[in-house]
Image (spheres, helix red, strand yellow):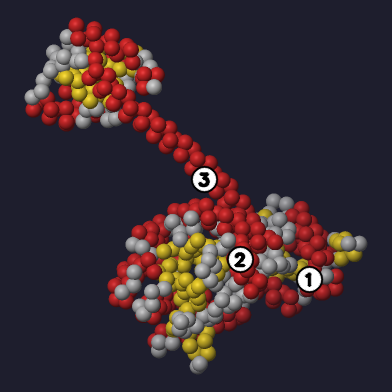
Amino acid sequence: MLDKFSKNLTVLFVEDDTAARTSIKMLLDLFFDRVFLAENGKEGLKLFEQNKPDIVITDITMPIMGGIEMSKIIRVRQPSQKIIISSAHQDIEFLLGSLEIGVDGYLIKPIQKKQFIATIKRVLERISLEIENENYQKNLEKMVQIQVAKIKEQSDSIMKQLRTDRLTGLANKEQLEIDFINKSPTEMLFLNIDNFDQINMSYGFEVGDILLLKIAKYLNEEVGEYQLYRLNGDEFAIMIYNKGIAEVEKFANQLKLTIYNKVFIVNDVSIRITVTIGIVPILDIYTDVPYSSAHLVIKEARELRRNSIAVFKFNPSSINKQKEGLEWAQKIKLALDFDLLIPYFQPIVNLQTKEIDKYECLARIIDKGNVISPFFFIESAKIAGILPEITRRIIEKSFAVMEKSKVIFSINISDDDLKEGYLNKFLNEMCSKYHILPQRVVLEILENISNYDAGDAIKQLEELKDKGFQISIDDFGAESSNFARVQKLNVDFIKIDGSFIKDIATDKNSQDIVKTIIFYAQLSGVKTIAEFVHNKETFHIVMALGVDYAQGYHLGEPKSELVD
């Protein structure tokens, strides 16, 4: 078998003795496809460079250049080259030289046929094994590439679903946020259908959905070069570049008039609509994303007259909103000063064992006996720059509770925490102080962090991961899911966004998206957690779909103490 294998190989034989060279060549011709002969090391090097033989067999003592010197040079140029040394010398210098080179075989002169065949066979077996391993590696790499391509295709499909409005097929709010950052529009139009609730009430939601489809198609034809998005319900957005406010107002008036004159036919019912349009000059807004400004300007326009157009301008109502944010910021500071910020613990159930497997640690403020959730204060804390202090307090208080337990628990981490760069040192200190292994701690990050381009943030997460802390992506699917980051960060858990879970019993699209996320997670070896499991039916559905863990009020409300 090896004879057949060796017939595809070549060998270089370097020997200064003519008789030995001739006799050994006859043996080599029996095994190899081609045999190259050289009289000394210098000639051998030249033939090696020209022909790249699979095996080099060389004598040691030769004129001009010896075998050891030649072999050293070959090893530098081709470290994996198979080399066999032949010599009558058996002194220590010969052995040391051979060991230094790392030769693959020895032939002691006078070379006997049996010895020669045995040595050649060992080298051929090694070459055969290396080729087999190389082919296996190539096949494995090919399989991985195919699998990666499948995952990428699946990822692209999921991201397309997440960035596309399910009803109209238009780009949705998530896609708008991406385009807003990447394309830098100069103006945006926000269009809201007047009295759409009355249409739903009068004709039913089925007619309402069909009407929205027709309106979306009509608007898409009318906006021309601009980009149309559907946001929520009866809200649409149009992104505009470098037109100037006067031209944008002219376009908005034309659009409003054409919609006013358009008759939409739905199930033999003629329906006319009007719209209120808010124009937001991007340079004049004071937030990262102009939704709050748009909602504000449309609200103010409707208070005056529907079927109208308004341009956003800074006004007292904006000041009131800022004032409310400042009041919450003061409440948070008082809560921190008087130790009124405490962790609540919500159980996460293992769907295999039906037992509580871990807890999520959630921030709460106690105000005059009332328990206030982060929904009311977290955004104000972020704006005020005190979100990292909240995280630090919740971490330490949670660790103090968990010191008496052995359960795994998760802490929510924001991009502000990563930007401050304190987590690595602080978490290590807390683990040491409260005798908690890093493997018990899951750091929950949002998708906007998993997509965060700052190399320092990713580096921090990777360092924490290396120390044993686990990583979970929270609200997966709520933002633009980035599966490349999931793989890069070696994520342990994906927490499927509650918007897909809460309606999963009645919404097939939600089921399809959840199935797709589970499929990807299983391929990647990532565990899934379903949040907002609010009733028995939802619990059984997520369990049947193959979700690993579940969390929600059906399984346990957040409490100030762990469940026994």
- Relative to 145, residue 260 above or below: below
Q: Amino acid at mark 1?
A: Phe
Side of 41 relative to 514 (left or right): left
Sequence-earlier tag: 2 or 1: 1
Q: Amino acid at mark 2?
A: Val
Q: Secondary structure at mark 1?
A: helix
Side of 249 relative to 561 (left or right): right
Give the residue drawn at x 60%, y 72%: 533
Q: Tag on residue 196?
A: 1
Q: Nearer the viewer, residue 183 or 121?
A: 121
Q: Nearer the viewer, residue 353 or 549?
A: 353
Label 3: few (<14), some (14–19) or many (≥20) C-alpha neighbours in 10 Å: few
Label 2: few (<14), some (14–19) or many (≥20) C-alpha neighbours in 10 Å: many
Which residue occupies the extreme right position in the image? 268
Give the residue drawn at x 20%, y 13%: 15
Give the residue drawn at x 32%, y 22%: 54
As measured in the structure, the alpha-carbon distance from the residue carrying label 1 to the one carrying label 3 is 45 Å
Mark toward the viewer: 2 or 1: 2
Q: Nearer the viewer, residue 384 or 31?
A: 31
- Residue 321 on image: x %, y %: 58, 80
Q: Amino acid at mark 3?
A: Val
As measured in the structure, the alpha-carbon distance from the residue carrying label 2 to the one carrying label 1 is 34 Å
Sequence-earlier tag: 1 or 3: 3
Q: Tag on residue 148?
A: 3
- Residue 142 on image: x %, y %: 49, 38
Give the labeled residue for mark 2. 542
Sequence-earlier tag: 3 or 2: 3
Mark toward the viewer: 3 or 2: 2
Q: Secondary structure at mark 2?
A: helix
- Residue 518 on image: x %, y %: 57, 58
